[in-house]
Amino acid sequence: MSASVLYDAPGPKAVVRNRVYAVVGSLAIVALLAVGVMRLADKGHLAPEMWDIFNYSGIRQNIADGVLATLKVFGLAAVGSLVLGVVLAVGRLSDHKPVRWLATAFIELFRSIPLLITIYAIWVGFLTDYSMWALATGLSVYNGCVQAEVLRAGINSVPKGQSEAAYALGMSKTQVMLGVLMPQAVRAMLPTIISQLVVTLKDTSLGYIILYPELLNTARLIASNTLVNGQYPYVSTIVVIGVIYVAMCLLLSALATWIEKRGRRAKTGIVMAGAAEPAEAPGVLDAPDGPPGPRTDAPKE
């Protein structure tokens, strides 16, 4: 076992001790899960009747409407945050001090304010009758500030020689930013950008505070309005809705991985042409093995 830069390789005793700790910790976690499941079963939360409610077409339709509403506001927030992130990143890197100061103040302000407060303030102050747009705007503002910092880090990671070469070719600053720096920044920071989009998808659950019928609000209504065996099916509803959230996040992550792999192939998938064979010199004929004969194209005396 080789040593790492960050820590020394454990010896035989340390390896045995770590394995014992891993086994004991795993058994403790399994025991806690077992106790939790037994307590839920004793209270009737795991009874089959608690799960049969999802066989009703009305509840299935409510869940489908909640998923559609969640994806709709996520699409708006994703596009809005990316566009705003590009604008703020370019503004923060601007040579004009007022533009740079304004972009910096906007980013620092809305990154410091809790997202829930931003959404509620937009809903109460401007878009009371349009909860979907209030939620999408709040998500776009907050996540746009985060995406701006991600893009700014990606732009700063591009070697300065590339921008200097572009300026030497006569390109304007806008052309350099949009044609040279921004594409490389997006390629370099794509995993972080997608990770923030996953956070945006999960943050759509904050729409319950402004009564937007997204997936979590739909789950709350289903669990609080359905009575089974004298109890409300909060546990089964949370499990089902949680699985749906996990599935959507995994699909988004899989899409990000696919896009990243395609980008990597597009960058390195160019097949170089083989070297061409040298052409024969004019006037030279292939001669058999042996002493060279007289040239047939020699000039006459």
Image (tube, rainbow, N blue to C red):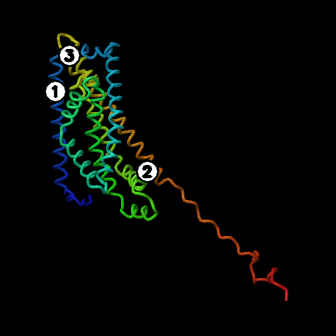
Q: Of the two numbered discs 1 and 2 on the same chain, state the one appearing first in sequence.
A: 1
Element on which disc 2 rests:
helix
Element on which disc 3 rests:
helix
In the picture, measured across the screen, residue 240 lies left or right of residue 289, that is left
Depth check, front residue: 80 or 158: 80
Q: Measure the C-alpha gap from mark 1 to mark 3.
A: 22 Å
- For label 3, the residue is 224
Counting from the top left corner in percent of width and height, residue 110 is at: 21, 41
Counting from the top left corner in percent of width and height, residue 125 is at: 21, 29
Q: Measure the C-alpha gap from mark 1 to mark 2.
A: 45 Å
User: Where 16 falls versus 115 (above or below)?
Assistant: below
Nearest-to-viewer mark from 1 and 3: 3
Q: Of the two numbered discs 1 and 3 on the same chain, state the one appearing first in sequence.
A: 1
* Residue at (33, 13) in percent of width and height: 58
Classify residue 4 by image quadrant: bottom left
Number of numbered tags placed on the structure image: 3
Counting from the top left corner in percent of width and height, residue 171 is at: 44, 59
Nearest-to-viewer mark from 1 and 2: 2
Quadrant position of the C terminus in the picture: bottom right
Residue 264, label in figure? 2
- For label 1, the residue is 36
Three-letter code for the amino acid on which mark 1 is drawn: Gly
Label 2 Cα neighbours within 10 Å, binned few <14 / some 14-19 / many ≥20: few
Counting from the top left corner in percent of width and height, residue 168 is at: 44, 65
Q: Of the two numbered discs 3 and 2 on the same chain, state the one appearing first in sequence.
A: 3
* Residue at (19, 38) in percent of width and height: 26
**Circles 3, 2 touching at the beta carbon (< 8 Å):** no
In the picture, measured across the screen, residue 276 lies left or right of residue 39, that is right
Three-letter code for the amino acid on which mark 2 is drawn: Arg
User: Where 107 falls versus 123 (above or below)?
Assistant: below
Depth check, front residue: 146 or 66: 146
